[in-house]
Image (tube, grey):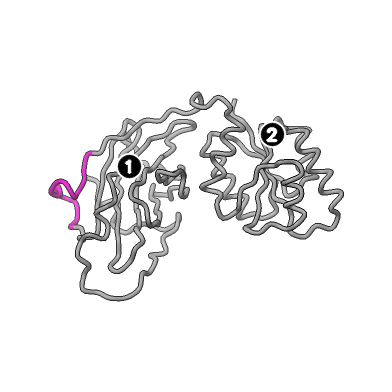
Amino acid sequence: MQPKVLIICERAAERDTIRVLVGTMGCQWILASGIQEALTLLGRERTSAALLELPGAISDPAKLEQGVRELLVRFPGRVIVLTDGAPGPLTNELISKYSIPSVQRDRLAVDLWPRLESMVYPQLGSRRITRVARLVLDTFLQPLPAGIRVLQPDTRQLVYEAPALTADISFERSPNCPRITLLGQVLRTKEPQIPLNGVSVVLKSRNGPLNLKMTNEVGEFSFEFQDERAVSLEIEVSPNEWVLLITPPLDWAGKAKDQAMSGSCISNGLTNDTKLPGKKARLV
C-alpha cells in the first residue's frame, strides 16, 4: 500500500509543488488548509506523515500550539514544519520546544525529499525500482546522424535508450552566460507516437535534488542551472519505477569559443507548459 502524506498549507500554489514532490516518492497525499481541517481528516484517513505550514498571522497562539501538539501525538517523529527564510518568534519557539524538523520553502526540492523519505520509508531500498538508461548518442563524441539538425558550439545533445523510454536531451549555453539550459523530451520506446506526458523528472547534482518538473503534453521538460560539474536525471515512467540518465561531465560548457555576440545572460523563460521548438525532429 502506498503511504499517504498529509499536507497542511494555506497557499494553493505551494501545495501543488509539495504534492508533486510527494508524488515522485511514490506517496499519495491529503490536502488541508489548516490544522483543524487536518485533524478532522485524520479521523477518516490513515496517514504516514504530516507537512505543516505555520500561518504567518496567528490570532490564537495557545490554540495553534494545542493543534501542533495533537499532530505530534498522532505522528510522533513524523511532522515537518515548512518555514520562511526568517521564521517568526512563535514558529521558532514551537520548532525548538518540540524538536520539530523544518524545511525552508525556497529549498523544498532540495531538503524536503530526504527528510520525508526517512519518515515514510524507514527501510530504504525496498520501495523503488531504478533502471539506468543507455547513452546511444553524444554529439561531442561522434558525428551527427542524418536527420539531426546542426548544433551550435555551445550545445551538446544526448540520446538515451531504456526498455520503457527513449530520451533526447540537450545542454545549451548562451554566449557570456554562466547558466546552462537543459531541454528534454521523453517518448515511449515501443510506442513513440504516444508521449510520456505528465511524468515527474527530477534534476540531481552530486549533493542531491536541484529541481523537479512535470513533462508537458508532448513529453517535454526544461531546467536551468549553473555551477554544477555533473548532473543526472530521474524519470518516473510508472509508479515506483524510475529511469536514471547519467550525463557526462559538464566541463565542456563555456570552453567553446563564444559567438560574436555581446549582452547579458537572458533566460529563455521555458516552463513545463512550453513546447520546445523542433524537439521532436531530433529523434530519428
Q: Is residue 53 left or right of residue 18?
A: right
Which element type, helix, strand or loop, lies under badge 1? loop
Q: Which residues are magenta?
A: 136-150
Q: Is residue 213 visible?
A: no
Name the residue: 39% across, 47% down: 219
Instruction: Give the position of the C terminus as an image quadrant.
Output: top left
Write down the residue under mark 2.
Answer: 77
Q: Residues within 10 Å of mark 2 (few under 14, many from 20)?
A: some
- Above or below residue 280? Residue 189 is above
Residue 215 visible? The answer is yes
The quadrant of the rendering that contains the N terminus is: top right
Q: Is residue 276 left or right of residue 210?
A: left
On screen, residue 239 versus residue 232, left or right, reads right
Q: Nearer the viewer, residue 223 or 186?
A: 223
Report x, y in % for residue 243. 38, 35
Along the line of sight, which residue is nearer the eye, 191 or 103?
A: 103
Question: Nearer the viewer's eye, disc 2 or disc 1?
Answer: 2
Residue occupying image coordinates x 22% and y 67%? 258
Badge number at residue 233: none
x, y percentage for residue 250? 29, 51
Q: Which numbered disc covers residue 193? A: 1
Task: Based on the picture, tell me whether residue 141 belongs to the magenta stretch.
Answer: yes
Mark 1 surroundings: few (<14), some (14-19) or many (≥20) residues within 10 A: few
Q: Are marks 2 and 1 in contact (CB under 8 Å)?
A: no
Name the one closer to the observer, 80 or 43. 80
Residue at 69% x, 34% y is 77
Q: CA distance from mark 2 to mark 1?
A: 46 Å
Name the amino acid type tagged 2.
Gly
Asked whether residue 269 is drawn in magenta, I would say no
* Residue sitting farthest toward the front: 96
